Image: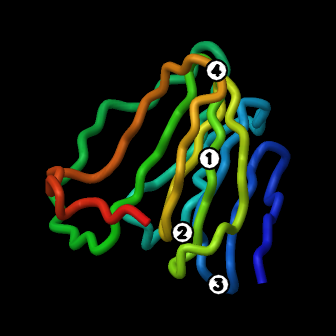
Amino acid sequence: MIAVEVAMDGIERITRGDDVYAIVLRSRFQETGTHFFTPGEFSQQLGMLVHPKGKVVGRHRHRPVRREVFRTQEVLVVLEGRLEVEIFDDDVELLKTVILEPGDAVLLARGGHRIAVLEACKMIEVKQGPYAGGDDKEFF
């Protein structure tokens, strides 16, 4: 069964059973503080930080930690324009279609996806590297 869970205003989790296929973060999310929306075992962590003027995050760095990644997860952040994102399950069945507006983001966690540009778009994409070339994608 496909579920679209609205965890908080502005957060949508697209799931089938216990599997999370995508998390949509809308620009309207306004909860103050630091909020992460991904399970700890995800290789990409998606969060939103909403801080008041004057907030300081102490100096820090991240220690080298060996991680093993089995699935490429990617995040798209729409800066300008509009995108239509189709989200597919592991059997390439369509689960959900979402429209992303400026300021919205999506974490594509598993399964497949199709992206159509509805209005000229400027976006940021973040995913694991290094890129594996032709072995990295399977078109269906």
Q: Nearer the viewer, mark 4 or mark 3?
A: 4
Task: Name the mark on residue 1.
Answer: none
Residue kind at label 2, given as amino acid type: Pro
As measured in the structure, the alpha-carbon distance from the residue carrying label 2 to the one carrying label 4 is 32 Å
Residue 89: percent from left, percent from top: 58, 74
| Earlier sequence position, callout 2 versus callout 4 | 2
Task: Check contact, mark 2 vs mark 3: CB within 8 A.
Answer: no
Task: Name the mark on residue 18.
Answer: 3
- Identify the residue under disc 4: 119
As measured in the structure, the alpha-carbon distance from the residue carrying label 1 to the one carrying label 4 is 13 Å
Residue 116: percent from left, percent from top: 58, 38
| Earlier sequence position, callout 4 versus callout 3 | 3
- Identify the residue under disc 2: 39
Q: How is the image coloured?
A: rainbow
| Earlier sequence position, callout 1 versus callout 4 | 1
The quarter in which the N terminus is drawn is bottom right
| Mark 3 surroundings: few (<14), some (14-19) or many (≥20) residues within 10 A | few
- Identify the residue under disc 1: 85
Residue kind at label 4, given as amino acid type: Glu
60 lies above or below 102: below
Q: Secondary structure at mark 2?
A: loop
